[in-house]
Image (spheres, rainbow, N blue to C red):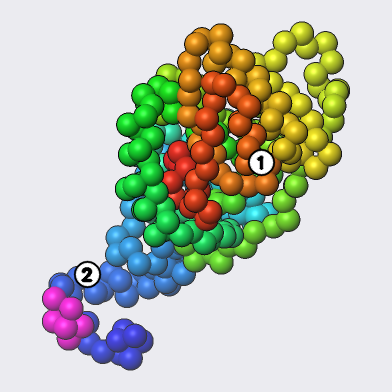
Amino acid sequence: MLLEQKTPQTAIAKKFGCSQAQVSNISKNRDAIREEYQSNSNPDKKRHRSGKAVDVEGALTQWFTEARSRDIPLSGPILTEKAADLAKHLNMPDFSATNGWLERWKSRNNIGFKRMHGEKKDADEGAANQWKESTLPTFLRSYHPDDIYNADETGIYFRALPDGTLTFKTDNSGGSKKSKERVTVLVCTNMTGTDKRKLLVIGKSKDPPCFRGVKSLPVTYTNSGNVWMTAEIFQNWLRDFNRDMAKQKRKILLIVDNCSAHPKGSADRLANIKMEFLPPNTTSIIQPSTRG
């Protein structure tokens, strides 16, 4: 550092294009400036700025640091709720944790979103494009969009923590072991979104304790030993779906993927449902129920 090398302050001021008084002030406060720089979570910032609610920001930063040290995943809504709670305890009733305030706090503290782990799924883009260009138009010529449905299963790990978190950009985030407890949910809707079928939820227990005393559910519930969709469960659901379409005097097209739980020929004896399959390894690209 030039000051430590006993370089004249006038020479330093000339080199950096500032006044000698500024250099003198920096020299007097060099220890405090160095300490603040070393403790700054975002050393790339050239100016030190504080938010409008310094006490809340400081408390939130401390809480955030402690939470991340325990590998707790954090998101924007969690932080705004915590900031509001801290403001309440700090007797600051006029404080509002707006999105703008949160973004400025994240910027000042060098915080960004990171995925703690991920998995890239192989997909056949060529087959997906060919299906969209040649097969899908034939369906649209034969069926009204109201009568084209898509169904797919998804797993819900209801005790698992998120796989991404807001964290310090300098932090090398790693995932931790997660709970594997899950249910499988079959979702089904038509192309226009005007008919969203009741969810089919597959759990492990035939009669879960949490259902006792419950007279009706907003979903259809069934169970399987490994909590996965089975051919039997799918065919039972398909027959119920067909009965409903028969009552409405509608003939529909149902598009599904070609997994083993969707046996070919499942709809052969169903008068009101025709079933078609997506090409292999394309669902992550073109299946509506997995998009968004």
* Tag shown at residue 232: none
> Can residue 68 be seen here?
yes
Q: Residue at x 75, y 47 (%)?
A: 180
Total marks in image: 2
* Tag shown at residue 263: 1
Q: Earlier in the sequence, mark 1 or mark 2?
A: 2
Q: Which residue is mark 2?
A: 22
Spot occupied by residue 195 in the image (x, y as percentages of width and height)? 47, 19
Q: Which quadrant is the C terminus positioned in?
A: top left
User: Is 36 placed left or right of 273 in the picture?
Assistant: left
Spot occupied by residue 159 in the image (x, y as percentages of width and height)? 72, 40
- Name the magenta segment's main secondary structure: helix
Task: Name above or below for residue 204 compared with residue 257.
Answer: above
What is the quadrant of residue 94 in the picture?
A: top left
Q: Residue at x 80, y 42 (%)?
A: 226
User: Is 282 placed left or right of 133 in the picture?
Assistant: right
Q: CA distance from mark 1 to mark 2?
A: 78 Å
Q: Amino acid at mark 1?
A: Pro
Residue 111 forms part of the magenta stretch: no
> Can residue 182 be seen here?
no
| The one of 288 and 239 positioned closer to us in this rendering | 239
CB atoms at circles 1 and 2 under 8 Å apart? Answer: no
Spot occupied by residue 221 in the image (x, y as percentages of width and height)? 73, 23
Under circle 1, the secondary element is loop
Q: Which quadrant is the N terminus positioned in?
A: bottom left
Magenta-drawn segment: 11-17
Residue 12 forms part of the magenta stretch: yes
Q: Amino acid at mark 2?
A: Gln
| The one of 291 and 79 positioned closer to us in this rendering | 291
Under circle 2, the secondary element is helix
Spot occupied by residue 6 in the image (x, y as percentages of width and height)? 30, 90
